[in-house]
Image (cartoon, rainbow, N blue to C red):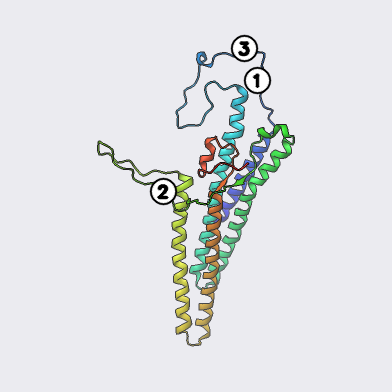
């Protein structure tokens, strides 16, 4: 099952890369300065709800294409990369749990190692997908004058000393009651707060299981009384519990890095809200 998911992730990643590369060759639409600008108010328009992304009413063809290429598509790629990264991380987490609960069973250990190998390969490919799209776009648009038309701008890390993305304790889940005694439902940013909080709780559970495994291995060492079978089983439990602990720590670092990475250059674009609110980029 995990192998099929990783194959699907790889195919989707390559599809996004090829799709972004093909769209980078589309020439931007140039507005004719000599034509008379018509008041957009008198033109028929299609109403768009406020919660859906769309160009403004008075935008021209070139501005609309720029909105699609430089905002909509990067936002979709950002969401896709984030979802695939979370999927790969869940695969690593499952492999760590399998190693933790194998207790010396060679068949379970081999299965866990296979899942871990494919999960790590999938995670590396997902992280490299951003670089692949950037390289394709840079080859398609090598001139500096076309830099603004790049589909995927260069990524940069967030310079924030107080990022509390993994513990969203700043936002209240239940707002205060109003004058009519009504209470709002829990809310929050799904990718920026809900998903990291869920992953953090999962890591807490796995860390608790690792602690139990270390305790169980220690008990086996104490009550083994020199028996080779008990000592071997205890050593295997301790070793694979340590590996699981290292994987959980790596997963925490990866999730923290993904959630604090801004993959869009336009700070005024709503696509920045896909991840977290960031400080202004240092010039």
Residue 198 seen by the camera: yes
The residue indicated by pointer 1 is 31
Which label's residue is closer to the chain start, 3 or 2?
3
Q: Taking 135 as reference, is 181 left or right?
A: left
Give the residue at x 61% y 32%.
Answer: 69
Q: Secondary structure at mark 3?
A: loop
Residue 208 left/right relative to 92:
left
The tag earlier along the polypeptide, 2 or 1, is 1
The residue sitting at 57% across, 48% down in the picture is 159
Query: How far apart are the alpha carbons under marks 3 and 2?
Result: 51 Å
Q: Are marks 3 and 2 in contact (CB under 8 Å)?
A: no
SS for callout 1: loop
Compare marks 1 and 3 and give the one earlier in the sequence: 1
Q: Residue 36, which numbered label?
A: 3
**Residue 267 picture quarter:** top right
Crowding near pointer 1: few (<14 within 10 Å), some, many (20+)? few
- What residue is rendered at 52% in x and 82% in y? 231
Q: Position of residue 122 (x, y in %)?
A: 60, 53
User: Under tag 2, what secondary structure?
Assistant: loop
Disc number for residue 170: 2
- Farthest residue in the front direction? 283
Say whether residue 1 is visible: no
Q: Residue furthest bottom?
A: 226
145 and 117: which is toward the camera? 145
Work out how far the residue at label 2 is from the one at label 1, CA to CA, in angstroms.
46 Å
Q: Nearer the viewer, mark 3 or mark 2?
A: 2
């Amino acid at each position: 099952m995990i192998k099929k998911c990783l194959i699907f992730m790889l195919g989707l990643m390559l599809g996004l890369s090829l799709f972004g590369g093909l769209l980078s060759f589309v020439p931007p639409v140039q507005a004719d300065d000599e034509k008379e600008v018509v008041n957009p108010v008198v033109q028929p328009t299609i109403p768009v709800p406020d919660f859906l992304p769309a160009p403004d009413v008075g935008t021209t063809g070139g501005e609309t294409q720029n909105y699609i290429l430089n905002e909509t598509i990067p936002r979709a790629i950002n969401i896709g990369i984030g979802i695939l990264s979370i999927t790969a991380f869940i695969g690593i987490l499952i492999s760590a749990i399998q190693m933790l609960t194998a207790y010396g069973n060679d068949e379970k250990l081999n299965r866990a190692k296979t899942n871990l190998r494919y999960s790590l390969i999938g995670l590396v490919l997902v992280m490299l997908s951003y670089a692949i799209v950037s390289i394709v776009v840079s080859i398609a648009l090598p001139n500096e004058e076309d830099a603004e038309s790049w589909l995927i701008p260069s990524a940069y890390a967030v310079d924030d000393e107080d990022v509390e993305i993994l513990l969203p304790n700043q936002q209240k889940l239940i707002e205060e009651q109003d004058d009519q005694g009504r209470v709002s439902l829990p809310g929050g940013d799904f990718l920026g707060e809900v998903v990291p909080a869920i992953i953090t709780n999962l890591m807490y559970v796995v860390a608790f299981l690792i602690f139990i495994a270390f305790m169980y291995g220690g008990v086996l060492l104490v009550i083994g009384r020199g028996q080779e079978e008990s000592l071997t089983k205890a050593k295997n439990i301790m070793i694979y519990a340590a590996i699981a602990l290292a994987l959980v720590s790596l997963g925490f670092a990866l999730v923290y890095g993904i959630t604090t990475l801004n993959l869009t250059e336009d700070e005024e674009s709503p696509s920045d809200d896909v991840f977290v609110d960031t400080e202004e980029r240092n010039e």
